[in-house]
Image (tube, rainbow, N blue to C red):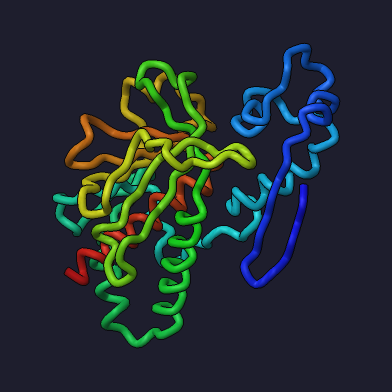
């Protein structure tokens, strides 16, 4: 390729089919540049480090520290969130009861503990970055077979920094290094204002097909437009807890503001 650096950056790339064919020596077919770019063929062994570097840049999930749930909100990382359910007497999966998160946040906002408020603000801010970077999950496609899954990325797109109600939460395909998601529609997308339920409890039809480790990683979202829960398996139990507690916090804050 030819490279020229000027006030307006200019880049020209020339494809060398002979070199491409040599690098992909295990292939007997003629290699087109498009085959490499769209991932039709695997990258050559010599480029493993390069592709790894690209992957780390495209998946910040693996580069940055994840949000830490504040101690005073830990109890909300197990219990379901339902939009039209009364806020009081929220029950968690371990059988304990407590006030709902909205009541807890209202108590904290009226209190004098600036450190507690700051800790919650930091968690909420880091959670937004965590979701905007994209959180890898496996979408469960069938409630009767936990083995039918697709690799996806759960991603937040903020439309208005002052309010999350119009922001979108999407499940998109997991990117391959060097391959753009432009023009590829997501198979699930919702605005915050349409979310009606968050849960870490799998439906009965699916629970019997999950092992104990998968049950800990389960997470689902329901909206007023979805025919049922959009079911996922997070990479870890910790991720599932962060998603449930963090999204609850963002949703409850929006309702308090409105």
To which quarter of the image does residue 19 belong?
A: top right
To which quarter of the image does residue 28 belong?
A: top right
Q: Of 190 and 147, which appears nearest the observer? A: 190
Toward the top, the furthest residue is 28
Q: In this view, does 154 lie to the left or right of 250?
A: right
Q: Of 135 and 112, which appears nearest the observer? A: 135
To which quarter of the image does residue 218 belong?
A: top left
How many discs appear?
A: 0
Q: At which x and y percent is residue 209?
A: 44, 19
Residue found 40% across the figure and 53% down from its top: 156
In this rendering, the answer to whether 19 lies above or below 155 is above
Residue found 73% across the figure and 17% down from its top: 30
Residue found 53% across the figure and 42% down from its top: 180
Q: At which x and y percent is residue 3?
A: 75, 56
In this rendering, the answer to whether 232 lies above or below 4 is above
Q: At which x and y percent is residue 35?
A: 64, 26
Q: In this view, does 83 lie to the left or right of 69?
A: left
Q: Of 214 and 257, which appears nearest the observer? A: 257
Could you tell me if residue 69 is visible in this image?
yes
Could you tell me if residue 216 is visible in this image?
no
- Image quadrant in which the C terminus is located: bottom left
Q: At which x and y percent is residue 8?
A: 62, 68
In this rendering, the answer to whether 134 lies above or below 64 is above
């Amino acid at each position: 390729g030819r490279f020229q650096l000027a006030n307006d950056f200019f880049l020209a790339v020339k494809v060398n089919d002979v070199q491409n064919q040599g690098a992909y020596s295990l292939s007997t077919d003629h290699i087109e540049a498009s085959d490499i770019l769209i991932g039709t063929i695997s990258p050559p062994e010599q480029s493993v480090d390069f592709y790894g570097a690209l992957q780390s840049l495209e998946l910040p999930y693996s580069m940055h520290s994840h949000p830490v749930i504040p101690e005073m909100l830990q109890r909300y990382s197990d219990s379901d969130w339902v939009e039209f359910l009364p806020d009081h007497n929220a029950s968690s999966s371990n059988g304990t009861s407590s006030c709902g998160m909205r009541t807890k946040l209202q108590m904290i906002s009226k209190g004098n503990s600036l450190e507690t408020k700051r800790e919650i603000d930091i968690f909420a801010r880091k959670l937004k970055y965590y979701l905007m970077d994209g959180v890898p999950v496996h979408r469960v496609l069938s409630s009767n077979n936990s083995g039918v899954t697709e690799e996806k990325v759960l991603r937040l797109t903020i439309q208005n920094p002052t309010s999350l109600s119009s922001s979108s939460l999407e499940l998109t395909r997991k990117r391959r290094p060097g391959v753009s998601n432009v023009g590829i529609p997501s198979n699930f997308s919702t605005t915050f204002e349409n979310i009606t339920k968050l849960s870490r409890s799998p439906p009965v039809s699916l629970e019997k097909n999950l092992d104990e480790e998968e049950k800990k990683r389960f997470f689902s979202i329901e909206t007023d437009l979805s025919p049922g829960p959009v079911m996922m398996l997070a990479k870890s139990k910790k991720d599932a807890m962060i998603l449930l507690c963090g999204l609850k916090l963002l949703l409850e804050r929006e309702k308090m503001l409105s």
